[in-house]
Amino acid sequence: MGDPDFHAPRTLDDAVLLLADLKNASLVSGGQWVVPRIRSQDVTPDHIVTTQHLEELRGIRRDSDHIIIGAAETHDAIATSSIADDAIPALAALASRVGDQQVRNRGTLGGALASDAGRTDYGPALLALDGVLTTSTRELTAREFLTDDQTARLSSDEILISVRFRIAKSASYQKLAHPAANFAEAGLFVSRFENGEVRFVVSGKDQWPIRLTEAERLLAAGHTDDISAYIKTRFHSDPFFASRLSALFSRVHE
């Protein structure tokens, strides 16, 4: 196979047209997921379309009770953003722990979500902060996007533009990270909102991000002592994972 052709559109409209016209094209943002797989020939595109010049995919801004983050913003940009840190400190802290420093410098929010939605740290954040993804063709809620049905997620000619996160009154994300790759072997994101709503989201190596509504009910009612027992029952088939989640909840609740 020859080297793929490289395309660097300057506007979102141009990028959309390219993806619609080109056959077997891969969209690349930071390249931390796609490029290694191209080199190992796990994926073999005929064309590479980069988003690096698309200003429509950049920016971090506050909009009332949400913050909106462009899909091309790097993890490091999110981690060091005063806007993100002021609005949702847990989200900025999450970004500061993605991968290693090289990954944080090059990898992007959009690339992480588009390439590996189930294992990225941003998955629990999406559910816990009522995330909404804006693409070149539609809007997707976190619940719609975080499904194990591959056809329900981004299509090959669809570009993720930005993600909107709801600002929480308080939030915390904790994870037990893989010692080499730094992805979450177990993750827990807990958020509370001004109106009293609570989100309790778990994830892991073998667990797609999900909300535990019973844990949310217990937490909202102040029955925190019952949550570890609930987790043990909920994940009785995987006691090791349950014990990890209980340990993470202890960190969140400190």
Image: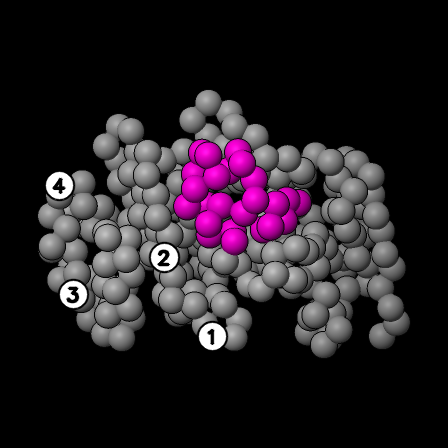
| Residue type highlighted by circle 2 | Gln
Gap in Å between the C-alphas at discs 4 and 2? Answer: 22 Å
Gap in Å between the C-alphas at discs 1 and 4? Answer: 36 Å
Left or right of 110? Residue 91 is: left
| Residue type highlighted by circle 1 | Pro
Q: Which residue is mark 2?
A: 174
Left or right of 83? Residue 229 is: left
CB-based contact (under 8 Å), mark 3 and mark 2: no
CB-based contact (under 8 Å), mark 4 and mark 3: no
Q: Which residue is mark 4?
A: 221
| Residue type highlighted by circle 3 | Thr
Secondary structure mostly taken by the magenta-highlighted segment of the chain: helix
| Residue nearer the viewer, 91 or 197 | 91
Of the two numbered discs 4 and 2 in the rendering, the one whose residue sits closer to the viewer: 2
Instruction: Work out whether mark 1 precedes mark 4 in sequence or the reverse, and give the earlier one.
Output: 1
In magenta stretch: residue 76: yes
Q: Which residue is mark 1?
A: 179
Q: Quadrant of residue 166?
A: top left
Residue 221 place in picture, x, y as percent: 13, 41
Asked if 138 appears above or below 254 in the picture, the reply is: above
In magenta stretch: residue 86: yes
Gap in Å between the C-alphas at discs 1 and 2? Answer: 15 Å
Instruction: Work out whether mark 4 precedes mark 3 in sequence or the reverse, and give the earlier one.
Output: 4
Render colour scheme: one colour
Q: Which residue is mark 3?
A: 233
Residue 37 place in picture, x, y as percent: 69, 70
Instruction: Work out whether mark 3 precedes mark 2 in sequence or the reverse, and give the earlier one.
Output: 2
Residue 41 place in picture, x, y as percent: 73, 75
Magenta stretch in the rendered image: 72-96
